[in-house]
């Protein structure tokens, strides 16, 4: 729903490392959207897909995703996610643990079974 479909051959990646989780999506911010607006305003890049997701109850269509990510990380005592915008939009989540062993254990508990920390998954068509 958020990716730029005009960047052919690009995929969304979810990368899990021992010290962070990164989600990378093709395309920067859509026209009319500025970094300062993140979490406060919304511009739908793909309105047809967004409307479909709204009709099936998958989204609320209010542009609250960024703010909810920030609130959830605060609620559980983690640092706020970091956002980077260039040709791709990247969000990075970092654990607040201080021990490397705790970081590794925390990330692997959340990883889908059968996948290793540091693995990359390409989510084609999402």
Image (cartoon, grey):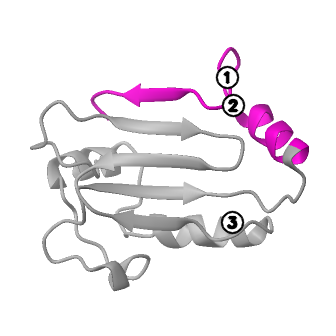
How far across and down, in percent of the image, does residue 50 sit? 26, 52
Residue at 69% across, 65% down: 73
Q: Are marks 2 and 1 in contact (CB under 8 Å)?
A: yes
Which of the 4 quarters of the picture holds residue 109? top right
Q: Which of 92 and 44 is in front in this view?
A: 92
Relative to 64, is 88 on the left or the right? left
Which of discs 1 and 3 lies nearer the camera? The answer is 1
Above or below 76: residue 111: above
Residue at 18% across, 65% down: 30
Task: Provide the residue span drawn in magenta.
Answer: 101-126
Identify the mark at residue 111; answer none if there is no mark. 2
- Classed neighbour count for the residue bearing mark 2: other residues with Cα under 10 Å, few (<14), some (14–19), many (≥20): some
How far across and down, in percent of the image, does residue 52 sit? 25, 44
Calculate the distance from the C-alpha at mark 1 to the C-alpha at mark 3. Answer: 23 Å
In the displayed orientation, state which residue is furthest to the top: 114
Pick whichever of labels 1 and 3 is earlier in the sequence: 3
């Amino acid at each position: 729903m958020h990716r730029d479909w005009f960047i052919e051959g690009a995929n969304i990646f979810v990368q899990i490392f021992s010290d962070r989780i990164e989600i990378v999506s093709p395309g920067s911010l859509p026209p009319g959207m500025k970094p300062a607006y993140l979490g406060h305003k919304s511009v739908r890049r793909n309105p047809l897909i967004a409307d479909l997701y709204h009709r099936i109850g998958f989204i609320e269509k209010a542009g609250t995703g960024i703010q909810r990510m920030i609130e959830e990380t605060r609620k559980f005592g983690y640092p706020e996610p970091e956002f980077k915008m260039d040709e791709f939009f990247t969000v990075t989540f970092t654990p607040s643990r201080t021990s490397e062993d705790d970081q590794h254990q925390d990330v692997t508990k959340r990883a889908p079974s059968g996948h290793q920390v540091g693995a990359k998954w390409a989510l084609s068509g999402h």
